[in-house]
Amino acid sequence: MRYITVTPVTNFFKPATRAFGNLAIIGDATGNGPAGVPVEITNPGEVQSPSHVDGSGDPIVGPVDSQEWFEGSLGAAVRVAFQQSPGPSKVVALRADPTDGTQLTDAFTAISTLDVQIVVLANTPLTDTDGTTEIEALAGHVNTVSNSGGDGKERIGVAMLGAGTTDTALVTGAMSIDRMTLVAHHSDEDAAAAYAGCIAGYPPHISLLLKPVVLSMDQQFTDSQISAFDDARVNWITDPLLIPGKSLMMGESYTLGADKPYVDIVRVIDDISFRLKAMLIRSIGNLRISRPGLRVMESRISGVLQPLVQNEVIVRFDVFTPLLTILDKAPEERSAVEAQQLTDARNARAVNSLISVVYAGAIHRLNLTLNFV
C-alpha cells in the first residue's frame, strides 16, 4: 500500500547561449591550403590540414597536420590576436585576398552564418592610397549581417590606419557606423588584429579604455595628434606615463558612429538582445494573450535582466506591457478603445512590450578641482 505516490517529471529549459569574443580574420596566405573556407583555431599554433576540406563550406575542425599555407598576413594576424591577454578563445581564419573584390565578397558570405562577433581584415591598413574599398566593404558586411543575418549574428568590424598615419580625413561616411571601430598605431604588426583580440578577451560591458595591447611599438603619438584622433573618434595605442613600466594600452574605445559612441555599448546591446530572445523563444506558441500569460512573459524578461543588475552590467530596468495594463482591469471597466486593442492583439497574436534599461558606462574622463586652503 502506497499512501503517497510521486511521479517526477522534468522539463527543464536551457536557453541558447551566444559567445561574446569569437573573432573572424580574413586575409591572404601562402602555400596550397584551403581558400575561401573558414578554419577554426583555438591557439596560434593550430592549423587544420587542407585534407579536411569536404566541400561543404563548414568550418574545418581537425588535427594539426600542416601549417605551410598559414604563413603570410593571415597567419601573422591570427598570432597577434592570440598574443593578447586576455584574448579570444576561438579565431576563425579564412584565406582570401581582401584586395580582390570577388574573393572578399565570397569570404563575407562564408562567415555570415558563423558564430563570430568581431571581424577584421588582415594586413589591411587605411592609408591615402589603400584600404578604403576593403574597409567600406567590411562596414557593409557587419551592418548587413547584424541587421538581417538572423539572431545571434550581430558583429562589429575592426580596422586600422596605416602605421604612423594621422590623417583622420581618410575615414569615409560609409565607414562611420556604430559597428565599426578604428585604431591608429606605430607598429609593423597587425594592430587591427591586436585590437580585435583585445576586444574579444573581455565581456561586452567592459570598456576597452586603458586595456593592455600586446604589440611591437616604440614610437608614440603627440598630444596634438591624439587630440585630432579624439575629435574624429579614432582610437589610438598609447603608453601612459602614469602607469609604471612600458605598457601599451588602448587610448580610447570609440566606435566610428555617433548613436552608440563606444564599443561596449554596441556589444552590451547585442548581448542583452540575444539573451532576451533566447529566453523568450519558449513563450512563442505557448503563452496565451491573457493576464497570467503576460505575467509569465514579464517574469521571464526580469529573469534575464535581474542578474545583469546584480553583476553591475546594468543599473536598473523597467518592463511595460500595455496589454497587461488593460487585462488588469475588469472587463466592464475597460474602455471601448482598450477592448478593441485587446481584440486586435488577440486576432493578430502579437504582443508589444517596452523594456527600458539604464546602462552606466565606465569612467573615461575625470576632472578634479584641487583647492588649497
Image (cartoon, helix red, strand yellow):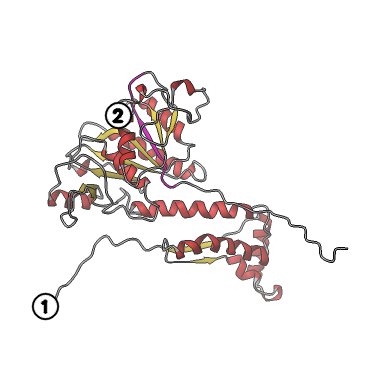
Q: Residue furthest front?
A: 1
Residue 73 found in image quarter: top left
* Marks 2 and 1, the one that precedes in the sequence: 2
Q: Nearer the viewer, residue 158 or 220?
A: 220
Image quarter in which the N terminus is found: bottom right
Residue at (30% x, 43% y) in the render:
195
Q: Residues within 10 Å of mark 2 (few under 14, many from 20)?
A: many
Q: Residues within 10 Å of mark 1 (few under 14, many from 20)?
A: few
Quickly name the residue at label 1: 372
191 lies left or right of 311:
left
Residue at (26% x, 36% y) in the render:
190
Quickly name the residue at label 2: 73
Give coordinates of residue 164: x percent, y percent: 16, 39
Q: Which mark is residue 77?
A: none
Is residue 302 within the magenta segment? no
Q: Residue furthest right?
A: 1
Give coordinates of residue 301: x percent, y percent: 55, 61
Residue at (42% x, 54% y) in the render:
268
126 lies left or right of 86:
left
SS assignment at label 2:
helix
- Give the residues drawn in magenta, as a range: 20-31
User: Mark 1: which amino acid?
Assistant: Phe
Is residue 27 within the magenta segment? yes
In the image, residue 327 sits, relative to residue 18, either above or below, namely below
SS assignment at label 1:
loop
Q: Nearer the viewer, residue 102 or 333?
A: 102
181 lies left or right of 341:
left
In the image, residue 219 sits, relative to residue 319, either above or below, namely above
User: Mark 2: which amino acid?
Assistant: Ser
